[in-house]
Image (tube, coloured by chain):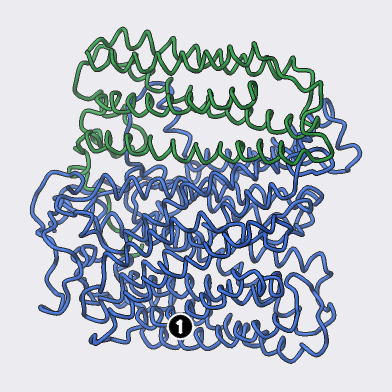
């Protein structure tokens, strides 16, 4: 890779301009403008609010204009306005040198990937802090620190932030960063949209946090009706949050699919596509199609709260079940939006650290696509105890249990890849191996919830909470850290400290299991979710769980210390390909130049040919070729 | 400054991207966007039939809840006519009849605007409100959000027409570098011959607009005829 031919002079740094500071200022101004307009509408046209003592129109308009102002301040409206005036299309913006580009609109996919990593990390820690407070509250059977309403808000904030923000935990930082590199492209298909997805997510997380100024929300992450309609203005934060997350996910999914379909380098056929990219396509297709349903449901809820429609109000011709159905049409694919990227990371990393080709490549692809397809046919198992027609139960029980088959494909491919491999127990590999253990428990406990008789007794209990923490935290968060330890050397040019990484892993793995395994028992013994009190005989187990959760939280601090120490203070340069990977991103310098490739590479092999040559030969011929999709 | 912030764009490399690439992207994105749009409106189709079947409190559709079939039909005719005109304009563009394309494009833009205006007129004159039962809720939510999609298409048509009109005298090649947005350090366009992208964008628009018009016809059938 040759050095850059001409490096332009960095721009002058300006406080006033399109950047995060301007975005925040205009966001606040936008909120108050919306608030003022909302109250004007209230005063002149709708008398409804005189009775309810709250003005959701003002809150929604405030949030809407706040987001518009935020995006305007970041510079997102300049290009659409230029297009309105007839100026021609362009692709790239602000791809200049300097740290400032990380605090504004930048269309470099690698900058966006790092922005995602930091942004998601911030909200992950906030969500984790909420979990610590929840476990602190549950140290004693009676309420001690928070009133019941505040406890519900705390639970809702934790669940909503984790489910919403972490939906993009792998695709946001890592797919944005490495997919173009893996497929031999210089950029994502739509770079501005890529940047927009990140900033929308940040706006969403920030607005969700403001719910505490409006009294919080009592519904947990599902936002069920009729509580949703009856709740105070804090509920509006939830609706706006998930709406923005939905738009962000939709655009992220669209961009990912378009990128992989159209921008593969010559020779990168579908059967040579890295398995990580297959996982990204599976996840992205769910994001693309499930998010619109969520957005529609939330818009209906918004209209119920503002314009007095009655989508979800039974006494006025609506139905609360309508919300449950629409929410779970999104909600169950959402579970796989969280899980599939974990599959993808594990299957991508295992061959590297087992020094073997990926076993059953086509089976692994079929497994992920099978999960994607079946995830559309299972949503009503969430309504087993809500009063659905009993005749529907067998179908949804069967379809849910069927998902274990394609999931089993993934497990099989992973296990067989390990079989007789020359396994290197690096930190990323340890996290991948933990995924097998955690996700197996999560999957097996899921069978109890898909089975009607056992679901009737465990639904809404700590058992189901333990189940989804094993699948989502055990399946996604562990692979999220695997991806961090694996790709950070490429993303930053620095190596994370190995010893601290292993301390982080073992602390997290043990504390995670110590936290969530007892919850199965607590659930069987009848403790329901989202309730601040519990019987006194469950205190020992709850205390055990709380202490374990605190250790789990402390393990995150070990990671944070490692991250800051390694990247800010120690700064040990990483080799170009420290893991001996054959994937294309590792054949590039660390960190990668902005334009990625001087010339578009040509693929001549798949990226998993380990064994013969210890994996040190790149699977591409880096010679000049016209840009374009793989044939 | 950390090392991962030291790089900057090699403009010589990135400022000559072939427009065919973006054309393919637009085509793919148009289809993906259509599928997402379908799922969005499926939620309203589901809501319609679900609430109609339940008829909770006997309030699915009180007698006075009857939107104007005339205005609704006129609106959907305007939508379909606009989509047809865009398709004809695309054929003109392919045949090199740029002036005719622009004429049809402006007409299509006007008709899309008329459709939105007719929808607003219908809301203003109908004899029921959002609180009048399940049908009224679905009707107002569905038509309201369909109108938002119409506004998005109007924006898309306008940007294409604005570019085609502003550079109507440039047959090929790129306008001055300063006309590209954003980066003050840019020395040229990052897409080689960006004006050539009007055609693929028009093709993507034509597909999406036809798809959305199809959803409009379905909307009209369900809300006004069933």
Can you say whether A110 is above or below A556 in the image?
A: above
- Give how far across and how far down residue A190 sits, in percent: 35, 42
The quadrant of the image that shows the N terminus of chain A is bottom left
- Give how far across and how far down residue B182 sits, in percent: 37, 36
Front residue of A290 and B201: A290
* Image position of A18 (left or right of B172): right
Can you say whether B97 is above or below A227 in the image?
A: above
- Give how far across and how far down residue A81 sits, in percent: 45, 28
Residue shown at 29% from the left, 47% from the top: A261
Q: Chain of mark 1?
A: A
Residue shown at 10% from the left, 47% from the top: A625
Can you say whether A163 is above or below A558 in the image?
A: above
- Give how far across and how far down residue B27 sits, in percent: 32, 34
> At numbered mark 1, what does the secondary structure look like: helix, strand or loop?
helix
Q: Colour of chain A?
A: blue
Residue placed under numbered mark 1 in the picture: A437
Front residue of B134 and A245: B134
Can you say whether A538 is above or below A560 in the image?
A: below
The picture quadrant where one finds residue B161 is top left
Chain that is green in the image: B
How many dots with numbers?
Answer: 1
* Image position of A276 (left or right of B120): left
């Amino acid at each position: 890779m040759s050095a850059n031919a001409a490096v332009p002079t960095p721009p002058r740094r300006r406080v006033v301009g399109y950047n995060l500071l301007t975005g925040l200022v205009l966001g606040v101004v936008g909120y108050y403008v919306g608030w003022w307009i909302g109250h004007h509408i209230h005063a002149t046209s709708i008398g409804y609010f005189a009775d309810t003592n709250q003005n959701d129109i003002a809150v929604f308009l405030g949030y809407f204009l706040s987001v518009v102002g935020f995006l305007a301040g970041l510079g997102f409206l300049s290009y659409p306005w230029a297009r309105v005036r007839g100026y021609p299309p362009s692709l790239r913006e602000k791809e200049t040198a300097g740290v400032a580009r990380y605090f504004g609109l930048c269309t470099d996919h690698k900058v966006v990937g790092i922005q995602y990593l930091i942004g998601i990390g911030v909200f992950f820690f906030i969500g984790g802090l909420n979990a610590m407070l929840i476990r602190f509250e549950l140290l004693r059977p009676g309420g001690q620190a928070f009133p019941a309403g505040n406890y519900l808000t705390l639970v809702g904030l934790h669940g909503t932030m984790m489910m919403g923000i972490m939906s993009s935990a792998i695709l946001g930082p890592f797919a944005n960063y490495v997919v173009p590199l893996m497929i031999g492209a210089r950029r994502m298909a739509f770079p501005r949209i890529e940047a927009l997805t990140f900033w929308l997510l940040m706006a969403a997380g920030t607005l969700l946090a403001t719910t505490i100024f409006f009294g919080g929300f009592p519904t947990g992450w599902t936002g069920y009706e009729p509580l949703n309609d009856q709740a105070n203005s804090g509920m509006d934060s939830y609706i706006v949050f998930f709406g923005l997350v939905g738009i962000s996910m939709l655009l992220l999914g669209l961009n990912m699919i378009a990128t992989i379909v159209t921008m593969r380098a010559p020779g990168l056929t579908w059967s040579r596509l890295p398995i990580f990219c297959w996982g990204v396509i599976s996840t992205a297709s769910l994001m693309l199609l499930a998010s619109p349903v969520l957005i529609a449901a939330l818009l209906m809820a918004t209209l119920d709260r503002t314009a007095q429609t009655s989508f979800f109000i039974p006494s006025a011709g609506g139905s609360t079940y309508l919300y449950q159905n629409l929410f779970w049409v999104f909600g169950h694919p959402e579970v796989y939006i969280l899980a599939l990227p974990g599959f993808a990371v594990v299957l991508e990393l295992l061959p590297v650290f087992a020094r073997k080709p990926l076993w059953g490549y086509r089976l692994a692809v079929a497994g992920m696509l099978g999960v994607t397809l079946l995830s559309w046919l299972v949503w009503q198992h969430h309504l087993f105890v809500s009063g659905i027609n009993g005749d529907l139960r067998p179908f949804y029980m069967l379809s849910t249990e069927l998902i274990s088959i394609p999931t089993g494909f993934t497990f099989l491919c992973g296990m067989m890849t390990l079989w007789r491999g020359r396994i290197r127990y690096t930190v990323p590999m340890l996290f991948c191996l933990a995924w097998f253990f955690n996700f197996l428990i999560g999957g097996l406990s899921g069978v109890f919830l898909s089975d009607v008789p056992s679901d009737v007794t465990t639904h809404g209990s700590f058992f189901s909470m333990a189940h989804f923490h094993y699948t989502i935290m055990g399946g996604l968060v562990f692979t999220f850290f695997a991806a961090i330890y694996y790709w950070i050397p490429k993303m930053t040019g620095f190596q994370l400290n190995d010893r601290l990484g292993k301390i982080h892993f073992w602390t997290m793995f043990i504390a995670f299991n110590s936290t969530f395994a007892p919850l199965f028992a607590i659930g069987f013994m009848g403790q329901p979710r989202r309730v601040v009190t519990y019987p006194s005989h469950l205190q020992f187990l709850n205390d055990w769980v709380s202490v374990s959760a605190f250790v789990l939280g402390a393990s995150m601090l070990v990671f944070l210390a490692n991250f800051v120490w390694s990247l800010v203070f120690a700064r040990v340069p990483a080799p170009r390909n420290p893991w001996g990977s054959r994937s294309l991103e590792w054949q590039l310098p660390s960190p990668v130049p902005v334009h990625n490739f001087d010339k578009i590479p040509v693929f001549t092999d798949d990226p998993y040919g380990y064994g013969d040559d210890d994996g040190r030969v790149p699977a591409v011929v880096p010679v000049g070729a016209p840009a374009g999709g793989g044939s | 400054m950390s090392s991962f912030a030291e790089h900057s764009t090699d403009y010589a490399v990135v400022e000559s991207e072939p427009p065919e690439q973006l054309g393919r992207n637009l085509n793919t994105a148009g289809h993906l966007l259509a599928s997402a749009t379908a799922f969005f409106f499926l939620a309203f189709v589901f809501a319609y039939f679900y609430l109609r079947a339940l008829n909770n409190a006997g309030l699915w559709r009180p007698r006075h809840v009857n939107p104007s079939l005339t205005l609704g039909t006129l609106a959907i005719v305007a939508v379909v006519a606009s989509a047809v005109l865009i398709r004809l304009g695309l054929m003109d563009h392919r045949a090199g009849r740029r002036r005719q394309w622009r004429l049809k494009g402006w007409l299509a833009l006007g008709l899309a605007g008329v459709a939105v205006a007719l929808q607003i007129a219908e809301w203003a004159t109908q004899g029921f409100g959002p609180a009048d039962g399940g049908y009224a809720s679905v009707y107002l939510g569905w038509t309201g959000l369909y109108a938002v999609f119409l506004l998005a298409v109007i924006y898309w048509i306008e940007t294409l027409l604005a570019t085609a009109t502003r550079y109507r005298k440039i047959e090929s090649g790129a306008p001055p570098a300063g006309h590209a947005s954003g980066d003050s350090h840019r020395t040229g366009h990052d897409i080689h011959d960006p004006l050539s992208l009007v055609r693929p964008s028009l093709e993507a628009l034509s597909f999406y607009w036809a798809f959305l018009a199809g959803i409009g016809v379905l909307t009209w059938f369900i809300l006004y005829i069933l």
